[in-house]
Amino acid sequence: MALPWTLHGDGKTVGPTDVVAPGERLNWPITIGIGAQHVVAMFGATFLVPLITGFPPSTTILFSGIGTILFLLITRNKLPSYLGSSFAFIAPITAAVATAGMGSALFGILAVGVLLAVVGAIVQFTGAGWIDALMPPVVSGAIVALIGFNLAPVAKANFSLAPLTALITLAAVILSTVLFRGILGRLSIFLGVIVGYIAAVIQGEVDFSAVGDAAWVGLPPLTLPTNPFENPAVWAILPAFLPVVLVLIAENVGHIRGVAQMTDSSVNKLTGRALLADGLATVLAGFGGGSGTTTYGENIGVMAATRIYSTAAYWVAGITAVLLGLSPKIGAVISTIPAGVLGGVTTALYGLIGIIGVKIWLDNKVDFSKPVNQFTAATALIIGIADYTFSAGTLTFNGIALGTVAAIVIYHLMTWVARVRRTA
C-alpha cells in the first residue's frame, strides 16, 4: 500500500522560505530526525504532569503515543499534532488523588474525554461556525498566546536549577538556526538538546543510576478507573474535572488556528475531527492509567522553528513514544535529561507558542485601535501570564482556563454593549 505522503522536492533540501506541508515529507532519515525532535519537544511537559500528579510517567508516555497515532488516523493525516499531557488536569487530578485515590482521578479523566468527544462529534455534524463566532481571531490569538506565556514559570523553574547548562542549551538552539544551512538549521532544538546534554554530563548533572536497573522491555503500570456504579462517591469529583473541557477545546482550537496560519485555512475544517480524536485519546488514557491528553503547543513551536509540518514526522514521534512506554530501559535513559536542558529548550519553545498567537492577530489584521480588541487581549494575557487562580469549593480554575473565559466573555460583552449603545 502506498504511503500517503508525497516527497518534498528532492527530499533532502528545504529552501529558506519553503514549507513542507502536512501531506509532504522529506526522505526518511531526515523525517526520523524531525520526529525525534518532536519527541524531545513533548518529552519534558508530557513527563512533568505525571511527575507532579504521582501518575506513572511510562504509562502516560505510552498513551500519549497511542493517542497521537489515533489522532492522525481520525484526522486523516491532514493535521500535524502530538497529543501530550495536558496541564489543565493537574489541579483536579491532585485533588481527586488526595481525597479518593488514583482510580477516581482516572474516572474524571475518562469523563472529560467522553464530553470532549461529544463536542467534537457535534462540531463535525454542525460545522465549526459557532466556534469561529465564539472565538474570533482576537480571542483565538489571545488564547494561543496565553497558553505559551502561561508556561513561562515552568521554563524558568527548570532554567534556575542549572543556569549554565540551560544557557548553553538555549544558545545552541538559537545559534544552530543560523550557523547551519538547510535541514541542520531546522534541527536546532534537537541539536540544542544534544549540546546541552553533553554539557550536563561534563558537569556531573546527569544521574545514570536508574538506567542499569531498568529492563529493556516491559509493560508500564496499568490502572483501571474507579467504577462509579460500584462506588457512587466518585461522582463528586466530576465538578472539578468537567471545566477542563473548556480548556481542551481552547487548546485544540488554538492549535488548529495556529497550524492553519502556518499552512492553509482548510485545516480549520478538521476542528470536529480533532476534538473527537483528542476526546477518544483522553478516554483511552483514563481507562489505562495515563494523564489526559491535548494537542501540544511545544510541537507547534518545533513546526514554527522548522517550517516542516509533515504528519509523517508525527507518526515517527507517536511510534517512538509507544516504544519508549514499552521499554523501561530507554525510558530511563531519556528521563536522565536534566532540568537545565529542558529549561533551555522550553525557554525558546514556550515563547514561540506565544508568538504564534501574535501571528494570528497580524495575519488576520486585528485592529488594536478598537477598545474591545485591546481589553480582550490585554486582560486575557495578564490573567494567563500571571496564572491567576480561582477556587469555588472543590473547583479550581488556573490562568489558562480563566484567561480563556476572560477573552471570550470580555469580547462578546463589550461587543454587545457597544452594539446596543451604538458606541462601536
Image (cartoon, grey):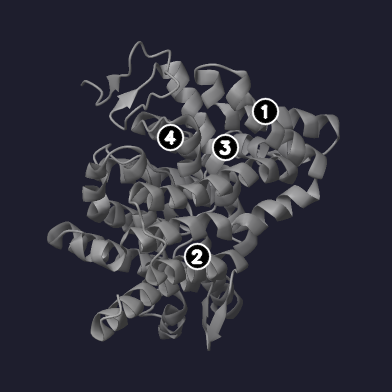
Q: Is residue 139 above or below residue 235?
A: above
Packing grade of label 4 (10 A; few <14, some 14-19, many >=20) is: some
* Quadrant in the picture for residue 129: bottom left
The span from disc 4 to disc 1 (Cα, nearest Å) is 21 Å
Q: Which mark is residue 319?
A: 4
Q: Nearer the viewer, mark 4 or mark 3?
A: 3
Packing grade of label 3 (10 A; few <14, some 14-19, many >=20) is: many
- Element assignment for label 4: helix
Residue type at mark 2: give it. Ala
The span from disc 2 to disc 4 (Cα, nearest Å) is 25 Å
Task: Name the residue located 36 percent from the left edge and 57 percent from the top edge.
Answer: 366
Mark 4 vs mark 3: which is more N-terminal? Answer: 3
- Element assignment for label 2: helix
Packing grade of label 2 (10 A; few <14, some 14-19, many >=20) is: many
Mark 4 vs mark 1: which is more N-terminal? Answer: 1
* Quadrant in the picture for residue 419: bottom left
Residue type at mark 4: give it. Ile
Q: Residue furthest top?
A: 10
Q: Is residue 63 above or below residue 114?
A: above
Task: Name the residue located 47 percent from the left edge and 78 percent from the top edge.
Answer: 240
Disc 3 marks which residue? 40
Q: Quadrant of the C terminus?
A: bottom left
The image shows residue 56 at horizontal and vertical percentages of 58, 55
Disc 1 marks which residue? 194
